[in-house]
Amino acid sequence: MINRLLRMKCLISFRLLNKYYMIAVDGTGHVTYKERHCPYCLTKEKDGKIMYYYHNVLEAKLITDNGLALSVGTEFIENTIKYTKQDCELKAFYRLAKKLKKEFPQLKICLLLDSLYAADPVFKMLDSYNWKYIITFKEGSMPKTYEEYLSLDKLQKNRIEIAEDGVIQTYSWVNDISYRGPVFDILQCSESKVNSKGETENTRFLWITNLNICKNNFFKIAKGARLRWKIENEGFNTQKNRGYNLEHSFSSNEMAMKNFYLILQIAHTIGQLMEKGLLKDKIEKVFGSITNVFFNLLEELRTRFFCQYDLERCTLVPFQIRFSCAPP
């Protein structure tokens, strides 16, 4: 489905720096059990005692600034039957990255990642794939590199302040920092604004990137970096709280559970394209929201009686379920 959208160039206007498709990668909880669900369950322990069993998933979503979060890859985080060390998000990332490279070998990609991925093996892997990346940078991830950055930041003159709508943003960056071979730039955004209580709020963002930062592109890179949160908001949060029931266990069979998750990604993709595409105005006018469209479809499936003639007719001509009226 995503390959079709790419070939149609539907998403070309949302590329970072008019070149790179932004793909955010993050993990999320799927289902949780009090007792072991299957041989592949992950376990949460405290003081040597298992508290619960769970299944997580690592997701890659193509992000756009108009709110799309389209699934382009999924890797289930699970233990093998015989394992010595539990599976984790970072291990799953290496598997997922290989799948993405195989599925999109020529696509210009910029990965948006959190601080977990600020590691030498990740840098080398992404450089070997000729991918760009923007990674959240925290002091604990690379302490020595962080200290080096602070020292260089005091000396360099790459500093620009932008004030708009009561928000003051100060951008600064340092180029060509070497870390065990890979070379990258570090971009900082310090934001200051006055809240409704009259109090000043200060926020600081820091990113590592192998994009070459300069005065012509620093703002676009920072804007793209902050879109990483869309995988949480428009992605996981929507799938958990807006009727998709991501965290609901519809089956005790682990294969059926995975199939449900993948079908959910397809449904969410279709829903987003309907809500933000050509049907946007019609949906708002007739149904109010995409959620109401799905409720109407569910009600049709629940109450519609299919006779033998209907089922036989399906094999001859296209079959449609039509909405009889708009919701009250």
Image (cartoon, rainbow, N blue to C red):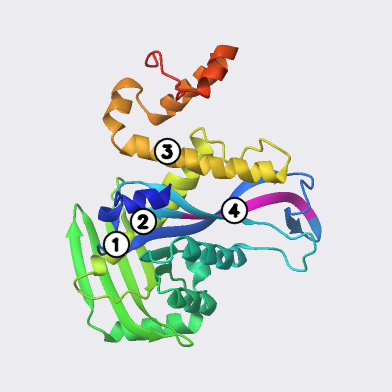
Find disc 4 in the rendering and name its residue.
57
From mark 4 to mark 1, how far is it between C-alphas?
26 Å
- What secondary structure is the magenta-colored segment mainly? strand
Query: Which is nearer the N-term, disc 4 or disc 2?
Result: 4
Query: Which is nearer the N-term, disc 1 or disc 3?
Result: 1
Residue 281, above or below 306: below
- Residue 194 horizontal/vertical position (percent): 27, 53
Q: Residue at x 51, y 37 (%)?
A: 241
From mark 4 to mark 2, how far is it between C-alphas?
20 Å
From mark 1 to mark 2, how far is it between C-alphas?
11 Å
Query: Which is nearer the N-term, disc 2 or disc 3?
Result: 2
Q: Is residue 54 magenta?
A: yes
Q: Give the extent of the magenta segment.
A: 50-60
Q: Residue at x 45, y 25 (%)?
A: 318
- Give the left or right position of residue 306, taking residue 48 as reference: left
* Numbered disc in front, either 1 or 2: 1
User: In this view of the protein, which residue sits in the foreground, 24 or 203?
Assistant: 24
User: In this view of the protein, which residue sits in the foreground, 9 or 207?
Assistant: 9
Q: Is residue 305 visible?
A: no
Q: Is residue 309 magenta?
A: no
User: Looking at numbered disc 2 in the image, what kind of residue is underneath it?
Assistant: Leu
- Residue 20 horizontal/vertical position (percent): 32, 64
Q: CB atoms at circles 4 and 2 under 8 Å apart?
A: no
User: Looking at numbered disc 4 in the image, what kind of residue is underneath it?
Assistant: Val
Q: Badge 4: how crowded within 10 Å, few (<14), some, or many (20+)?
A: many
Secondary element at tag 2: helix
Find disc 2 in the rendering and name its residue.
227
- Give the left or right position of residue 134, taking residue 241 as reference: left
Find disc 3 in the rendering and name its residue.
270
Find disc 1 in the rendering and name its residue.
16
Q: Badge 2: how crowded within 10 Å, few (<14), some, or many (20+)?
A: some
